[in-house]
Image: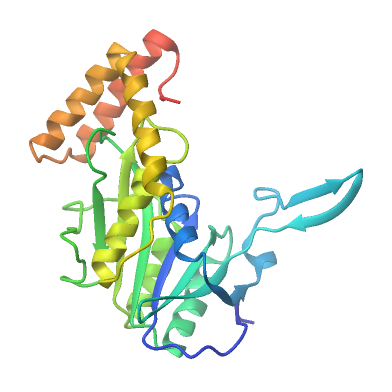
Amino acid sequence: MSLVRLNRATELISPTVIVAFDAWVDAGSASSAAVELLAEESSIVATFESDLLYDYRARRPTLDILDGRPTSLDWPDLTIRHARIAERDLLVLSGPEPDFRWRELATDIAYLARQVEVEQWISLGAIPAAVPHTRPVPVLGTESAPGLLRGGVRPGPDGLLRVPSAALSVLDIAVAQAGIPAVGYFAQIPHYVSGPYPAAAVELLKSLEAHLGVEMRLGDLPAAAEQMRSRLDTATALDEKTRSYVGRLEGMVDEARLPSGDELITEIERFLRERGTEQGGGQIH
């Protein structure tokens, strides 16, 4: 039994799949916010067997109780939505990251992608990094073959990086092995920021804009990003340790030098240690 159900026949012309999951590589809810805006005027064309994909004790459905009477349940759900921007057909795959059956899911999605003649696959994500909020959001790229990334985004980091995988990457590899060009755009957000980071969502949409050659709606995200920047500036100004740390990160960015993995870990550990000594915490809220 396939984990994905195509709900209705939709006439598609060389569709592009854009995928983002709410979980592992969605720091600051950046990729979730980006695809939510992208899919605002869209229709569901495929659904998934949620009972086979999710651990409901980890992702409990939301229960509505009206005047003491349980009325409805909102279940975690993965969907594919059809959106059209300019003359492009987009299939937006989004929802909570599945808990189970990743390899089976990847096989089914790769089969569906070939079935509807997907032209390209674009993953969106966001990761915490040693970057300052006072500079433009950096975007790191992945690609299944050289030369697929656009908009000046470079693949990286150089060399071998071994990290726990997200379901997103399992799907990327499966569709690439099925012969579909696959790229990923991953915004890097300041690790010291907690909660949504709308500036990263804006940058992901701009990366999509550059890749697809179509104008993307940004909605209220730019205004939300300005408000967040103002709050972070105020919080940084009030704490000398944080101000000094952000200054070090600015220096690295201004020198156009990306920290190595060891440097990144060292910087984060030093920041947390210094903040912990002073305040017993390591994040700006």
Residue at image location 42% in from the left, 65% down from the top: 170
Please state, as top left, top right, bottom left or bottom right, where the N terminus lies in the image.
bottom right
Query: Is 165 above or below relative to 240?
Result: below
The one nearer the camera, 227 or 270, is 227
Give residue 229's position: percent from left, percent from top.
34, 33
**Residue 48, quarter of picture:** bottom right
Q: Residue furthest right?
A: 68
Give residue 245's position: percent from left, percent from top.
24, 22
Please state, as top left, top right, bottom left or bottom right, where the C terminus lies in the image.
top left
**Residue 110, quarter of picture:** bottom left
Give residue 28's position: percent from left, percent from top.
43, 43
Residue at image location 25% in from the left, 68% down from the top: 211
Query: Is 140 above or below relative to 7?
Result: above
- Whether residue 85 is visible to the viewer of this picture, yes or no, is yes
Q: Which color scheme is applied?
A: rainbow
The one nearer the camera, 284 or 169, is 284
Image position of 61 (left or right of 173): right
Image position of 172 (left or right of 267): right
Give residue 33's position: percent from left, percent from top.
46, 53
Q: Residue furthest left?
A: 255
The one nearer the camera, 238 or 23, is 238
Residue at image location 47% in from the left, 72% down from the top: 106
Image position of 154 (left or right of 194): left
Residue at image location 34% in from the left, 51% down from the top: 202
- Whether residue 143 is visible to the viewer of this picture, yes or no, is no
